[in-house]
Amino acid sequence: MDYNALRSVMTERQLAPRGITDKRVLEAFLNVSRHEFVPVELRAASYGDHPLPIGEGQTISQPYMVALMTQALGLNGNERILEIGTGSGYQSAILACLAKEVYSVERLKGLSEKAGEILARLGHRNVKLRVGDGTLGWEEHAPYDGIIVSAAAPAVPGSCIEQLANNGRLVIPVGSMWSQSLLVIEKKGNETISRDLGGCVFVPLLGKDGWKKNGNDR
């Protein structure tokens, strides 16, 4: 299967026509092999316009959604980024191409270990992984120029605002367990400015400041 051709089609038909205009972001999507991050039996569908299951009840997000969230960070290459929800590691790889340092937290050890193996094999050396409660962030390396949350929160976790640098951006889906709004939040001193990029559906963000396993938020 010609994965290079499939990446070109994905970029030209799914991303560019729908408002993904950042040339660096488009280049990253052309260069990162999405099929490496999905189960072998699903690789034929790797570049389709939809999410795919990756095990343990988790998914690799639709390429367009990954691109939309990444573009919203407005990266120039010198940033320190926090990713909450490593999942397959695909978003981590995209961020690794666009930022200086990426710190990614995943609550599921199996997913984190598998993502780490793939990222290392593909040569993404500027990504550091941690297993833990993503709703608490990763305080040790804060502040972050950008934070991207790849799971749905009932409200914005306090750690995300606390660990975000001044003039930094947070991209996070917020809403119910079944439907969310994708928010971009900019930190300006003691204030935040929020804008809504539209509706989305993500797996729930579980943890102290997220959803509980029984489906209740607090």
Image (cartoon, rainbow, N blue to C red):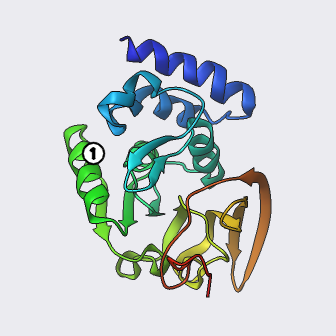
Return the x and y of residue 2 as percentages of the image width and height.
Answer: 38, 11
Res 32 seen here: no
Q: Residue at x 64, y 29 (%)?
A: 15
Which of the two residues, 43 or 149, is positioned nearer the viewer here?
43
Which of the two residues, 146 or 210, is positioned nearer the viewer here?
210
Please, is residue 141 above or below residue 105 in the view? below
Q: Which residue is mark 1?
A: 119
Residue 67 occupies quadrant: top right
Quarter the N terminus occupies: top left
Return the x and y of residue 104 as percentages of the image width and height.
Answer: 38, 63
Left or right: where 145 falls relative to 88: right
Type of amino acid under label 1: Leu
Res 217 seen here: yes
Return the x and y of residue 118 as percentages of the image width and height.
Answer: 25, 43
Return the x and y of residue 25 as percentages of the image width and height.
Answer: 55, 37
Which residue is the extreme one toward the front? 214
Left or right: where 107 falls relative to 98: left
**Count of marks overlaid on the render:** 1
Q: Residues within 10 Å of mark 1 (few under 14, many from 20)?
A: many
Quarter the C terminus occupies: bottom right
Left or right: where 19 falls relative to 118: right
Q: Residue at x 38, y 58 (%)?
A: 102
Please, is residue 135 above or below residue 72 in the view? below
Please, is residue 124 above or below residue 207 in the view? above
Q: Residue at x 69, y 67 (%)?
A: 174
User: Disc 1 on helix, strand or loop?
Assistant: helix
Q: Residue at x 73, y 25 (%)?
A: 17
Left or right: where 176 falls relative to 85: right
